[in-house]
């Protein structure tokens, strides 16, 4: 069994599609970050383990889900239907085989699925990370897999939008082998709270810039 942490904030529209496409052997852990649209009830009705995540923040939700995980390998992915759980076995395979310590799903966007401002911000951060660390990271995407005990040992502190970057930075410092595999990026369901808006992208870039400094 593999645990899949799904940080959630008002994803009632997307949850049924995401949870019903979870591959066999993958246990969804919905980390609800204060939803007001019944997301928790929907997730429970569809068989997911639900944990409440506080305070408000992407990293806080990821950490709460990680704390609830119990299996050897854990994955993270967005729960807005922009990423297909059917891609999880491809992302997990390098970690399960022992050829990588962290595998990132490198997003290949369908037309119109990835706003230009978000795509450029992601590319800039990946290039800066490559320049500073020498690790060839093409995408800091939210679908990723690693071993639970190893990621807990990284002692991640960010509880906002910097969580994905902090994980990679600390993994590099710890000498992890990092791999990337392509995954398809679809148009998300509902309204984006982060990179779908200029304000959300700016906040994410600001949080990550602090970590890079």
Image: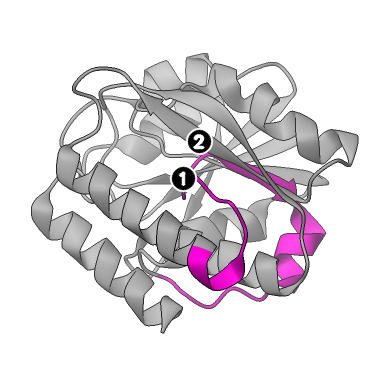
Q: Position of residue 39 (x, y in %)?
A: 33, 37
Tag of residue 139:
1
Describe residue 196's horizontal placement relative to residue 205 as left or right: left
Classify residue 76 by image quadrant.
top right
Q: Quadrant of the C terminus?
A: bottom left
Mark 2 lies on residue: 106
Describe residue 174's horizontal placement relative to residue 55 as left or right: right
Measured along the vertical axis of the image, is residue 162 above or below residue 73?
Answer: below
Q: Position of residue 133 (x, y in %)?
A: 59, 69
Q: Are marks 1 and 2 in contact (CB under 8 Å)?
A: yes
Q: Which residues are magenta?
A: 131-159
Say which residue appears at 66% left-offset and 76% top-offset.
155
Measured along the vertical axis of the image, is residue 201 above or below residue 15?
Answer: below
**CA–CA distance between discs 1 and 2?**
5 Å
Query: Sequence order check: which comes first, mark 1 or mark 2?
Result: 2
Q: Quadrant of the N terminus?
A: top right
Classify residue 5 by image quadrant.
top right
Say which residue appears at 27% left-offset and 65% top-offset.
205
Classify residue 126 by image quadrant.
bottom left
In reply to whether residue 97 is colored magenta, the answer given is no
Tag of residue 97:
none
Say which residue appears at 65% left-offset and 61% top-offset.
67
**Residue 46 visible in this rendered orientation of the protein:** no
* Mark 1, secondary structure of its residue: loop
In reply to whether residue 156 is colored magenta, the answer given is yes
């Amino acid at each position: 069994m593999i645990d899949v942490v799904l940080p959630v904030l008002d994803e009632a529209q997307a949850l049924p599609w995401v949870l019903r496409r979870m591959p066999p052997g993958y246990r969804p852990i919905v980390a609800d970050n204060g939803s007001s649209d019944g997301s928790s009830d929907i997730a429970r009705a569809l068989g997911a383990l639900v944990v409440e995540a506080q305070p408000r923040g992407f990293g806080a939700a990821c950490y709460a889900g990680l704390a609830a995980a119990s299996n050897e390998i854990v994955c993270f992915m967005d729960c807005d239907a922009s990423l297909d759980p059917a891609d999880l076995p491809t992302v997990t395979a390098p970690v399960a085989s022992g050829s990588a310590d962290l595998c990132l799903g490198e997003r290949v966007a369908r037309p119109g699925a990835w706003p230009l401002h978000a795509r450029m911000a992601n590319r800039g951060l990946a290039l800066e990370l490559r320049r500073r660390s020498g690790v060839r990271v093409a995408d800091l995407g939210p679908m990723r897999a690693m071993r639970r005990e190893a990621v807990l040992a990284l002692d991640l502190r960010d509880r906002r939008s910097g969580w994905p970057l902090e994980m990679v930075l600390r993994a590099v410092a710890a000498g992890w082998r990092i791999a990337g595999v392509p995954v398809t990026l679809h148009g998300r369901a509902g309204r984006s709270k982060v990179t779908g808006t200029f304000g959300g992208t700016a906040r994410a870039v600001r949080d990550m810039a602090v970590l890079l400094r």
